Amino acid sequence: MLRTMFLFASLLLASTAIAQGFKFPEEGREDNTEERARNAKIAQQLSTPCRSRIKNQKIMVLIAESRNGVINARQAQYNQHIHTINDGLKALGLKTYSQEQIRAQVAQAEIDAYFKNDPDAALSASKRMAANYVLRGLIETEASRNLVVNVNQIHINMSFTLSGPDGRVISQANASNASFAGSNISGMALDLVRESAQEVVGQLYSDYCKKASK
């Protein structure tokens, strides 16, 4: 009897291992396929031959959060987000500004006005920093109740707008995500920026190159 039970258990474990051995690699291959496709897309975007046009040109990155129609543009709060984006921009040969440099030259009132689509403020901020480009990132959130699992859900979207010193829009890119986590919007946005920085920078760069070649 014990021998029969042992044999049955062995067969059960073996069949489970076979089933898992079949399933998990498939899932891994799907993940790898998505990752390869993502990397290939980024590589294609960054392969556009116009880096010589932007090499050593200056770009100022500003980030703000819009919640219930109220904009928070205190740049110190988004220092890590900006640092992540700056890394991608510097890899393309652009020169970026630190938050300390921006705060020393641009008044908070001008930054606030910039996120309210005030063209004069945008022009003034660009001139003060002698920036060739301005990249504006706006974090927007929407909270709702997921009735299926009965938890609060936060949907977060980041829209990026690349413009020239005169305010002319050159490119736009978006990144979004949803979370069942609670109220740490800034932390969620930072995770989203880290996950999407390469794709966002690749999209902006590709759009810039296409327009510059026309």
Image (spheres, helix red, strand yellow):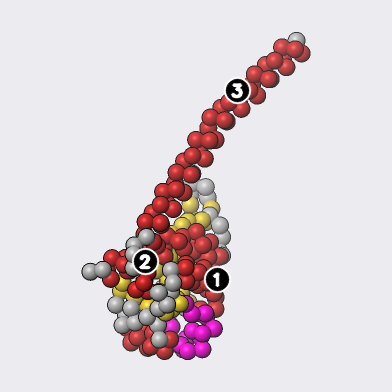
Q: Residue at x 31, y 67 (%)?
A: 209
Q: Residue furthest top?
A: 1
- Most common secondary structure along the magenta stretch: helix
Circle 2 sits in a helix, a strand or a loop, which is it? helix
Residue 144 in sight: no
In the picture, the quarter occupied by the N terminus is top right
Mark before the other along the chain sequence, 1 or 2 = 1
Name the amino acid, label 3. Ser
Q: Residue at x 44, y 72 (%)?
A: 93
Disc 1 from disc 2: Cα separation: 21 Å
Q: Depth check: give the residue in front, 18 or 145.
A: 18
**Picture quadrant where residue 41 is located:** bottom left
Name the amino acid, label 1. Gln
Which residue has dot 2 on it?
A: 205
Q: Residue furthest left?
A: 214
Disc 3 from disc 2: Cα separation: 51 Å
Q: Depth check: give the residue in front, 43 or 119.
A: 43
**Picture quadrant where residue 133 is located:** bottom left
Circle 1 sits in a helix, a strand or a loop, which is it? helix
**Picture quadrant where residue 161 is located:** bottom left
Q: Depth check: give the residue in front, 59 or 177.
A: 59
Q: Position of residue 200 (x, y in %)?
A: 41, 63
Which residue has dot 3 on it?
A: 15
Q: Position of residue 99 (x, y in %)?
A: 52, 80
Image: magenta residue range: 96-115
Which residue has dot 1 on it?
A: 80
Mark before the other along the chain sequence, 1 or 3 = 3
